[in-house]
Amino acid sequence: MDVRLEPWSEAVLELLRQINTPQMRHHVGGPESEEQLLVRHRRYLALPESGRGCMFAVLLDGEMAGSIAYHRRDWRGKEVFETGWNVLPAHQGRGVAAAAGAALIAVVRGIAHRPGSPRALHAFPSVENAPSNALCNRLGFTLLGPCDFEYPAGSGTLMRSNDWRLDLTAPAPAGGPEA
């Protein structure tokens, strides 16, 4: 299984549409309108230039299988990196999210050592999203507990999430999911 991360591009707008279904967006408020989707796509395209993060298409053996991102965010008075992911239904249950998560953590660990960079990566899956919570555990995150989390950022809409934290300054576990 060859899982690779490729920076977001115009070519992957269709992937965003495939993710925008009731099944895939169940835990984050449901599908968005085409206009909202295009705004999201433009935001993803601009993210690397902002210096605040990067959205990636997840490729499985060259085929688009999902997305994963990291970006800076203020959380409880500190700047942290946040991550989130999606894996299309046809590719779920095959280790794609774990491989993509490990690849993303390796990228963010490298960035975390730069001066002024956050030193922690957080994930905020819904408390009801068992697969994403299990993935956080598998990737070595520490569960800090449930919280009310604004999603999307700036919307004023709160979702009940679990706050998972990964210390980016700690050595990666030998033989663990990042190896």
Image (tube, rainbow, N blue to C red):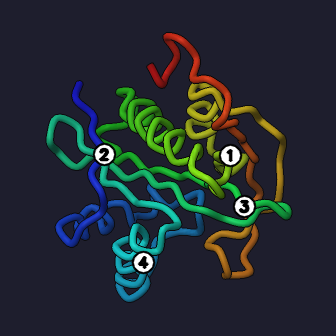
* Residue type (three-letter) at the residue carrying disc 4: Arg
Point out which mark residue 79 bears.
Answer: 3
Residue for badge 2: 5
Quadrant in the picture for residue 24: bottom left
Circles 3, 1 touching at the beta carbon (< 8 Å): no
Residue at image point 82% right, 40% down? 144
Q: Please, what is the three-letter code of the amino acid marked with disc 1?
A: Arg
Question: In the image, what residue type sits under mark 2?
Answer: Leu
Q: Nearer the viewer, residue 133 or 83?
A: 83
Q: Which residue corresponds to mark 1?
A: 119
Figure quadrant of residue 38: bottom left
- Spatial CA span between label 1 and label 4: 24 Å
Query: Which badge, 2 or 3, is on the more N-terminal residue?
Result: 2
Rendered view: 148 above or below 175: below
| Circles 2, 1 touching at the beta carbon (< 8 Å) | no
SS for callout 3: strand
How much space separates mark 4 and mark 2, taking CA atoms? 18 Å
CA gap, disc 2 to disc 3? 24 Å
